[in-house]
Amino acid sequence: MNRNILNFVITIVIALVLSLFMDWYSVMVASLITGFLLPLKRLAVFIVPFLSIFILWVVYSYTLGSSNDFILAEKIAVLLDLKGNTTLLLVITGLVGGIVGGVAGVLGKQLSTLFSKD
């Protein structure tokens, strides 16, 4: 299996498992672990964890919001001056999580480089 796809899937699985026991920062731990154990190269170091956490948070936010017809999401979108646009709120939520996951993935890669015996 391609290393990028493997990192993508394992990041999502670890983030889901850790989210049962930890707060929102569990995605950072998941991206750091996969970045350390499965180091990627070049731009994929940031992009793969970014996309995995982005998709995870958007899907999770959508499932939580759809269970109550996005009532709370609309109110939060009004508070954030998004004019009640819940789709934009979901995208912003995914971007925040994706950036956090991507930065943690880069940190994991740097730690694996630091501790390598080469």
Image: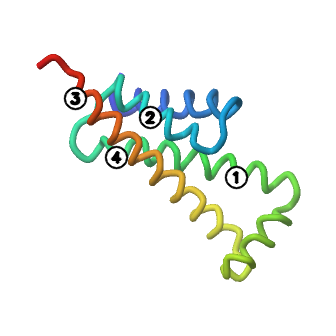
Vertical placement of residue 48 versus 81, above or below? above
Q: Are marks 3 and 2 in contact (CB under 8 Å)?
A: no
Q: CA distance from mark 2 to mark 1?
A: 19 Å
Query: What percent of the width, then of the height, locates residue 62?
Result: 71, 53
Secondary element under disc 3, as helix, strand or loop, is helix
User: Badge 2 local density, few (<14 within 10 Å), some, or many (20+)?
Assistant: many
Q: Nearer the viewer, mark 3 or mark 1?
A: 3
User: Badge 3 local density, few (<14 within 10 Å), some, or many (20+)?
Assistant: few
**Mark 3 residue type:** Leu
Q: Nearer the viewer, mark 4 or mark 3?
A: 3
Classify residue 111 as left or right of residue 67.
left
Name the residue tied to disc 4. Answer: 46
- Choose the circle earlier in sequence order: 3 or 1: 1
- Choose the circle earlier in sequence order: 4 or 3: 4
Q: CA distance from mark 3 to mark 1?
A: 36 Å
Name the residue tied to disc 3. Answer: 114
Q: Nearer the viewer, mark 2 or mark 4?
A: 4
What label sits on residue 113 in the rendered view?
Answer: none
Q: Nearer the viewer, mark 3 or mark 2?
A: 3
Secondary element under disc 1, as helix, strand or loop, is helix
Query: Which residue shows up at 42% across the image and 34% down it?
Result: 32
Name the residue tied to disc 2. Answer: 8
- Choose the circle earlier in sequence order: 2 or 1: 2
Query: What percent of the width, then of the height, locates residue 88?
Result: 62, 70
Name the residue tied to disc 1. Answer: 61
**Mark 2 residue type:** Phe
Query: Which residue shows up at 85% across the image and 51% down it?
Result: 67
Q: Give the quarter of the figure containing the C terminus.
A: top left
In the picture, residue 40 is in which quadrant?
Answer: top left
Q: CA distance from mark 4 to mark 1?
A: 22 Å
User: Badge 4 local density, few (<14 within 10 Å), some, or many (20+)?
Assistant: many
